[in-house]
Image: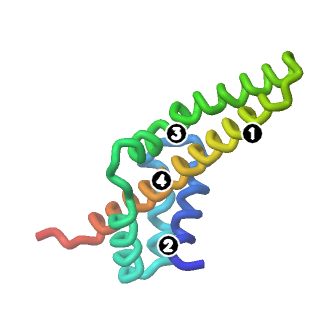
Amino acid sequence: MGQYERLILMAEDELIQYSTDARKIEKLRPKIGLSVTPTEQKQVKEALLAEMPTDFLSQLVEKQRQTVALPFWGIAGLGLLFGISLSQPLDYIATIGGAAIAIAVQKWGWRLQAKRLVLQTLEDIERLTRKPD
């Protein structure tokens, strides 16, 4: 596992805790500063900048992943409800499909949010280490 993946996993671990983005960045900064060289930090930052999507849907999923996934959870629930109450085994396809799409959207948003947190942390480290002119 490269530095890139390791930093993303560290950010995902920070996302689990309920705190502000500033606090998460503050907690990530020493971890990244001690474990990743400045050269590797620049490489990871460049890779993140190149990889971060700029389209509307990706930004919406990054900021509101649960809201975007909610209709798919509803489809899954309705499929389950109709499958049980109407004894229709084909309705379970909606349950499986809706749940799979909802989980995929949630994972995608979680990953995008972690990448954004790493990018913000690297920019913060760069800002703090830059010498004043």
Disc 4 versus disc 2: distance between alpha carbons?
13 Å
Q: Residue at x 52, y 31 (%)?
A: 67
Determine whether label 3 and label 2 are within 8 Å by CB.
Answer: no
Residue beneath the point at 44% across and 46% down: 21
Task: Identify the residue at horizontal 39%, vertical 64% (top origin).
Answer: 51
Label 2 Cα neighbours within 10 Å, binned few <14 / some 14-19 / many ≥20 = some
How far is disc 1 from disc 4 in space, using C-alphas? 24 Å
The residue labelled by disc 2 is 4
Measured from the top left, where is residue 37 in percent x and y? 42, 81
Q: Earlier in the sequence, mark 4 or mark 3?
A: 3
* Residue at the spot of label 3: 65
Residue at 71 percent of width and 30 percent of height:
76
- From what the image shows, is residue 3 above or below residue 109? below
Q: What element carries label 3?
A: helix
Question: Residue 24: percent from the left, percent from the top?
Answer: 49, 51
Residue 125 % position (x, y): 35, 66
In-front residue for pair 44/25: 44
Camera-nearest label, 1 or 4: 1
Identify the mark nearer the N-term, 3 or 1: 3
Q: Which of pointers 3 and 1 indicates the residue nearer the eye?
A: 1
Which disc number belongs to residue 112? 4
Image quadrant in which the N terminus is located:
bottom right
